[in-house]
Image (spheres, rainbow, N blue to C red):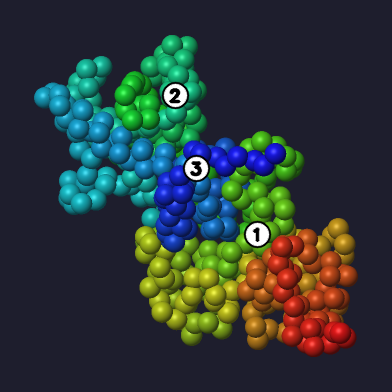
Amino acid sequence: MAKLPDINIDQTLEDIDKELEKKQQLEAPRNYLGMSQIGEECWRKIFYSFRGVAKRVIPASNLKAIEDGYLQEEIMAKRLRLLPYIELHTHDPNNSKEQISFSLLLDHFRGHCDGMILGIKKAPHTWHVWENKAVKIEKFNKIIKSINEYGDKYALEWWDSIYFHQAQIYMHCSETKRHYLTVETPGGRDFISCRTNYNKSISENIITKAKTIIFDNWNIPAKLSEKREFYKCKWCEYSEVCHDGEIPLVNCKTCRYSEPTKNGRRSCLCKESLEKNEFIEINDRGEIKNESLYLDNCPYHIYNPALISAKLIEQQADCCTYIIEENGTKFANCIKTSIPELKDSLDAIYTSLELKNKIKNINNLKPQALKIQQEFSGEIVEDNQKVWNKTYKNGLKG
């Protein structure tokens, strides 16, 4: 019996989801470490995120939830302002078009709070950092449970670690002692609140964590779990790089020559690409202001060894050599004009662009695969693709 078509499918609505996802893919990645993510349990995940090792893909359902969060924030602000005793500031007093923002660690660690509020009934004379979250019903019920079990002041810490750490660093930056969180169901039909006290020790630990992730470029944090199937790793957007050996993206943040410096900028230390040390200026849209530098196809890019899933043998001025211990393959990651000192003992030499675009995954670097690739000038492709080198095709006998 033929399968009946799903009468609930609306191609128009499906196309909206596709357009939302397409629009998100065109957005430039954030070029700083966000205070809203510092509470993430996995340090390695934050390390990867800050360096832009993979293109973030957000499904349409999540994009719509994010959009709802922004809308509910505006609605909740209007509701609070209905009360004559409430004073709420949602924008920078010095610039009415900008959110209230905070910045630490040479402007590489940034955050934007929803507002500053004065006058709430529980503490009418105390300024609070205000944040609003729109969450699913299940999560909304959990904060009610946390408030009932742990009390108003401790509920946030037990309910959501990421929101709790965000609250602590915002209080630290704003030099306030209280945080006021309003939580809504989707659409804002139900809401609840809790207050949180400032903890100096926790805030200082947060700053130390951020400093390590931003400036310790050579030591990658440990995995949250060595098991790929662990539920928090299984659904992580960086699992393919972390567990599966996928080659990271080519950009200034994954490059060995790039170092964070003042004013949220990065300094390029590559003598080949620059006559002298020069700042790589990246605006909030992720665009590089220096026209001579390229975000994703710089010919002088060499991967930060911490991001390559192989054992580093040696670093040279314009080259890094590695060995894959599982199969003994030795290879180099070099700029195009480099000649590695150990070239005679290497199985292959690649630029970063070749590693990313041709090899794709560190597990593809196997002796047999390299032999075939070198013989036919080929490249690694996905199983559902059929790409044939012209030389190879011309050599086929019909």
Q: How many angstroms separate mark 2 from mark 1 (CA)?
A: 39 Å
In front: label 3 or label 2? 3
| Residue appearing at x 40%, y 76% in the figure | 290
Which structural element holds mark 1? Answer: helix
Q: Amino acid at mark 1?
A: Leu
Q: Return the residue at label 3.
A: 9
In front: label 1 or label 3? 3
Classed neighbour count for the residue bearing mark 2: other residues with Cα under 10 Å, few (<14), some (14–19), many (≥20): few
Q: Which mark is residue 280?
A: none
Quarter of the image where the C terminus is located: bottom right
Quarter of the image where the N terminus is located: top right
| N-term mark: 1 or 3 | 3
Q: Which mark is residue 307?
A: 1
| N-term mark: 2 or 1 | 2
Question: Residue 233's spot in the image, x, y percent?
Answer: 66, 41
| Residue appearing at x 72%, y 43% in the figure | 228
Classed neighbour count for the residue bearing mark 1: other residues with Cα under 10 Å, few (<14), some (14–19), many (≥20): many
Question: Residue 314's spot in the image, x, y percent?
Answer: 75, 70
Q: Return the residue at label 2.
A: 137
Which structural element holds mark 3? Answer: loop
Q: For residue 305, which quarter of the picture?
A: bottom right
Q: Amino acid at mark 3?
A: Ile
